Image (cartoon, rainbow, N blue to C red):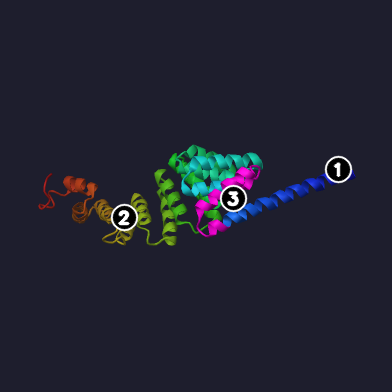
Amino acid sequence: MIRTLLCIISLLSVINLQSQAQSRYVVKVDKYLAGGDTVKAVKKLNKYISKKPEFAELYLKRAKLKIERGDYDPAMVDLNSFCSLNRICGEAEYLKGIVRFKQHDYNGAIVHLSEYTKIRDNSTAWFYLALSHMWLQNYSLAINGFQKSIQLEANQPLAYYNAGLASFYTDNFSNASMFFAQALELSPNDTDIKIAHANALMQQKQYAESNALLREITIGDKNYPAALFNIGVNYFNLNEKDLACDYWVQAKKIGHLQAKDATQRHCEKRLGRVKKW
């Protein structure tokens, strides 16, 4: 019994010494990173790993730096090495998901991020898991993921916005409008969100409310032509055909292609100044 106890104490001492050595190496690397010298930090990590290839934490550190540089395949090699040595992937599972997402392998991202969110509720992990489902048109799963992310961190206009898009794509315009409204509360000057919210209101036949949002988009904004066109669509749906044509002509003049088509189809007789193409 005493002998067994001594063996355990000895083993714990070895593990503790390894951990301290490992941390010492990481601290040295962090000093270079604090000074902005990423190249030197990577060189040091390469040297330390060649000397101490059994130290898992060094692989994880190097993988993070490789991900920042966009070296995704080499980063994945380091992450696999970390998981092999550490037995439990933990954060590496999350990073594998991010790598796969960056590589546009959304199925691969879902595998890793799903595993990670089973063991830890992480807002960013849920967000990227939801985005991966969005790319694969798994809209219900995407909405669930965005909501999980929002529960963990409420101040996320992009999470609300993308949840709104996923709802819009499933024709749930009421939910889409709700999500877009919440996104606008957090990011009131984002005109992409305003356009999306206005479109959701339009689908619910709330044309006046839609136009009120669209009029907030001003000249010079990249969404201004689309705002003019959609104001015209709202007026057309309200049977205000002359007003619709006025806005479509303005949108056409600044290059909106759908406005050009709309004036051809609906405005030539009303507006003699509109030429045939």
Which marked residue is nearer to the observer: mark 3 or mark 1? 1
Q: Which residues are magenta?
A: 31-59
8 sits to left or right of 202 = right
* Residue at the disc numbered 1: 4
* Position of residue 142 measured from the top left corner of the image (x, y, whole percent): 48, 45
Q: Helix, strand or loop at disc 3?
A: loop
- 70 relative to 51 in the view: left or right: left
Q: Which residue is mark 3?
A: 121
Q: In the rendered structure, which amino acid carries the disc numbered 3?
A: Asp
Residue occupying the far right of the picture: 1
Give the Cα distance between marks 3 and 2. Answer: 40 Å
Query: What whole-number distance in Å separates the C-alpha atoms at marks 3 and 1?
Result: 39 Å
The reply to whether the magenta stretch includes residue 140 is no
Q: How many marks?
A: 3
Q: Which amino acid lies under the numbered mark 2 shown in the image of this protein? A: Tyr
Sort mark 2 into few (<14), some (14-19) or many (20+) by Cα contacts within 10 Å: many
Q: Are marks 3 and 2 in contact (CB under 8 Å)?
A: no
Which is more N-terminal, label 2 or label 3?
3
Q: Position of residue 231 (x, y in %)?
A: 27, 55
First in sequence, mark 3 or 1: give its number.
Answer: 1
What whole-number distance in Å separates the C-alpha atoms at marks 2 and 1?
79 Å
Q: Which type of secondary structure does the marked residue at label 1 adopt?
A: helix
User: Magenta region's main secondary structure?
Assistant: helix
Residue at label 2?
207
Q: What amino acid does circle 1 point to? A: Thr
In the figure, 89 relative to 190: above or below?
Answer: above
Q: Residues within 10 Å of mark 3 (few under 14, many from 20)?
A: some
Q: Is residue 39 magenta?
A: yes
Q: Earlier in the sequence, mark 2 or mark 1?
A: 1
In percent of the image, x 65 and y 54: which residue is there? Answer: 24
Residue at the image point whose x is 62% and y is 48% from the top: 57
Residue lying at 61% horizontally and 47% vertically, measured from the top left: 48
